[in-house]
Amino acid sequence: MHKLILPVAVSLFFFSSCQNSGQGDAVKTAEAEVFKIHDEVMPRIGDIMKLQKQLKAKIAATDSASAGQGTPSATLRTDEEKDQAMRLNRRLAEADSLMMDWMSNYKGDTLTTLKPEQALQYLDAEKQKIADVQKKITSSIADAKQFLGGK
């Protein structure tokens, strides 16, 4: 009986190691998926900064234009443009802030301390968060570009 315990224990150890290795691969794959989204959207932060600068210039230009306009309809148009530029600028700032928040709150170094199932759950939640950030960045950039005339 004792002669069977050692081979069974060794077999269970190797089986368990193989399973954990497979789960470790799943964790690595899930983390790669999260960072694929991050890596696609991170360079767009430069676009956000450029568009914010253009929107601020547009806001300043509408301020100057409304000061020099005498007709109520022209003033209304410039006020509406200014309001829209300010809204778009806030959306860009929010998208940038969401990205910075996600990066500062991501705890990839703790993945090794979690059980594989917990790590996969954490990564799934993080993938959802970064995908939401991606959507907000993409839409705010597209809307700002459209407003600025496709620049």
Image (tube, helix red, strand yellow):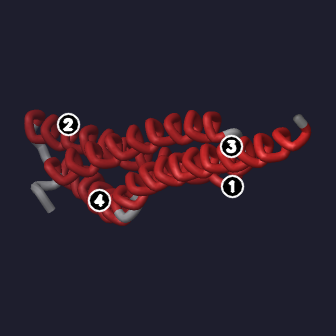
Counting from the top left corner in percent of width and height, residue 96 is at: 44, 51
Residue 97 appearing in the image: no
Using the image, tell me which numbered label, if any, was put on residue 109.
1
State if disc 4 and disc 1 touch (CB < 8 Å).
no
Q: Position of residue 16 (x, y in %)?
A: 68, 43
Amino acid marked by disc 1: Asp
Which residue occupies the foreground of this view, 79 or 71? 79
SS at mark 4 in the image: helix
The residue at the point 87 percent across, 43 percent down is: 3
Q: Nearer the viewer, mark 1 or mark 4?
A: 1
Q: Which residue is mark 3?
A: 16
Q: Label 2: which residue?
A: 80
In the rendered structure, are the residues bearing label 3 and label 2 in contact, judged by CB atoms less than 8 Å apart?
no
Which of the two discs, 3 and 4, labels the residue nearer the N terminus? 3
Q: Which residue is mark 4?
A: 51
Separation (CA) of disc 3 from disc 4 = 53 Å
For the residues labelled 2 and 4, say whether their Cβ atoms are less than 8 Å apart: no
- Residue kind at label 2, given as amino acid type: Glu
Badge nearest the viewer, 3 or 1: 3
The residues bearing labels 1 and 2 have C-alpha atoms spaced at a distance of 47 Å
Report helix, strand or loop for mark 3: helix
Counting residues from the N terminus, which is met first, the one under dot 2 or under dot 4? 4
Residue at image coords 64%, 46%: 20
Residue 81, percent from left and from top: 19, 42
* Left or right of 129 on screen, residue 11: right
Q: Amino acid at mark 3?
A: Ser
Q: CA distance from mark 3 to mark 1?
A: 23 Å
Q: Tell me which corner region of the image, top left, top right, bottom left or bottom right, holds residue 132.
A: top left
Q: Is 96 located above or below residue 73 in the figure?
A: below
